[in-house]
Amino acid sequence: MGIHELRPAPGSKRKPKRMGQGTASGAGRTAGKGTKGQKARSGGGVRPGFEGGQMPLTRRVPKRGFSNARFKRTFQLVNVGRLGDHFENGGEVGIPEMLMAGLIGDAKRPVKILGDGEVTVALTVKANAFSAQAVAKIEAAGGKTEVI
């Protein structure tokens, strides 16, 4: 059985309640919104985190510390085994070539070459970072690595 074959149990799926369709429907008149007030109005309601004018929790709680998360470099990862599948012997492989081959999705983000798989062709690989295992495998196949 695949995920595309999943179906709800017979009788378990109900049709949504149709609000404001007359008093006999059971959801007419106020249409489940109660009586009056900001939340009963058309377009009414308050933004997430609003506490009726009281100082919101997010502003009451003290902010402490520092996070380097916004400066983190996230690499696009490419294994050496995939390089051998997409490029010929003696070829030069840079970020534009990897993008054209579909190995990476964004030319602006840095690329790191990892050592999973086997490379049998001699390639000159240019990337932002290499694992030690990747460098060893590329050079063992007669290729070169170049950090850009």
Image (spheres, helix red, strand yellow):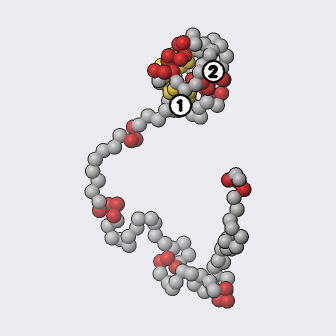
For marks 1 and 2, give the one nearer the viewer: 2
Compared to residue 35, the image places residue 53 above or below, namely above
Secondary structure beneath label 1: strand
Q: Which residue is mark 1?
A: 77
* Horizontal and vertical percent position of residue 95: 57, 25
The residue at the point 58 percent across, 25 percent down is 117
Left or right: 50, with 40 as reference point: left
* Amino acid, disc 1: Leu
Label 2: few (<14), some or many (≥20) within 10 Å? some
Left or right: 135, with 101 as reference point: left
Q: Are marks 1 and 2 in contact (CB under 8 Å)?
A: no
The residue at the point 63 percent across, 11 percent down is 90
The residue at the point 66 percent across, 23 percent down is 86
Give the mark, 1 or 2, whose residue is nearer the N terminus: 1
* Horizontal and vertical percent position of residue 18: 66, 78
* Horizontal and vertical percent position of residue 8: 68, 65
